[in-house]
Amino acid sequence: MPKKILFCRVILGIATAFAGAGVLSAQQVDYKKDGPALLPDLSATTGAIRLHSKTTICSIKWGKDERHVTQKMKDDAYALYGTAPGKGVCAFNTHTGKNGKPVKEACEIDHLISRELGGDDKPENLWPQPYTQHPGAHEKDWLENKLHKEVCAGTISLADAQKEIKDDWYAAYLKRKPAP
């Protein structure tokens, strides 16, 4: 792990400990932007890959497998970006869902390289992504599913899909954006 990232993670651990005690809450990195979309800071959220096999990726029943993201990992990701549920870019927003019922959204702790593209449940692959802005988490979720289908259909290599979503998920989305 590069020294800068290791240093940030050590400082983040110390800051998180103090934040839990109400003493300190320090943002370590800033979101990047591509037009209207927020992107993770790749100097801290570098991405992590667990699976490299197309055969494995395409045979797993995603959503039925076990995740290994702890609450501490989520809290650390929020602290790294200086936000929390209900605060900053993760402010709560309520809208009416397709079923007519109110839906309250803020952020999700997202995998930079999604699990269905072989992404790992490691801190360097996690970042808080807002649902409340567009483009945001809903659009990236759509892209993750689209790239997974493309990998399994053989229209893109797994490595290329991983690179596209890691480097700039919004640019990858715009290349595939559904017609209105």
Image: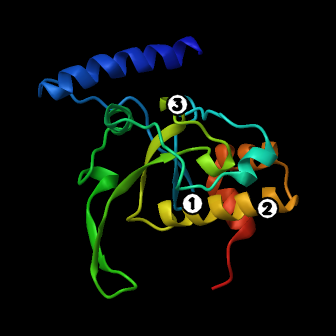
Mark in front: 1 vs 2: 2
Query: Residue 55: x, y in percent?
Result: 80, 47
The residue tagged with tag 3: helix, strand or loop? Answer: helix
> Which of disc 3 and disc 1 is earlier in sequence?
3
Asked if the residues shown at circle 3 and circle 2 are in contact, with their CB atoms under 8 angstroms apart, the answer is no
Element carrying mark 2: helix
Q: Please name the residue that numbered disc 2 is placed on.
A: 150
**Mark 1, secondary structure of its residue:** helix
Q: Residue at x 30, y 43 (%)?
A: 83
x, y percent for residue 78: 34, 39
Q: Residue at x 28, y 29 (%)?
A: 26
Q: Quadrant of residue 58?
A: bottom right
Q: How far apart are labels 1 and 2 at the CA level?
A: 15 Å
The location of residue 10, given as percent across then percent down, is 39, 15
Res. 124 mark:
3
For the N terminus, give its image quadrant: top right
Seen from the viewer's position, the closer of residues 108 and 80 is 108
Q: Can you name the residue that lies furthest to the right here? A: 154
Q: CA distance from mark 3 to mark 2?
A: 25 Å
Assess disc 3: are there few (<14), some (14-19) or many (≥20) residues with their C-alpha within 10 Å of its C-alpha: many
Going by the numbered disc 1, the residue's amino acid type is Lys
Mark 1 near mark 3, Cβ–Cβ under 8 Å?
no
- Type of amino acid under label 2: Glu
Badge 2, how many Cα within 10 Å: few under 14, some, many 20+?
some
Question: In screen coordinates, is 57 left or right of 94?
Answer: right
Q: Furthest-left residue in view?
A: 22
In the image, residue 171 sits, relative to residue 180, either above or below, namely above
Which residue occupies 51% across, 31% down?
A: 122
Q: Left or right: where does residue 131 sit relative to residue 102?
A: right
- Amino acid identity at mark 3: Glu
Q: In the picture, residue 12 is in which quadrant?
A: top left
Q: Which residue is mark 1?
A: 140
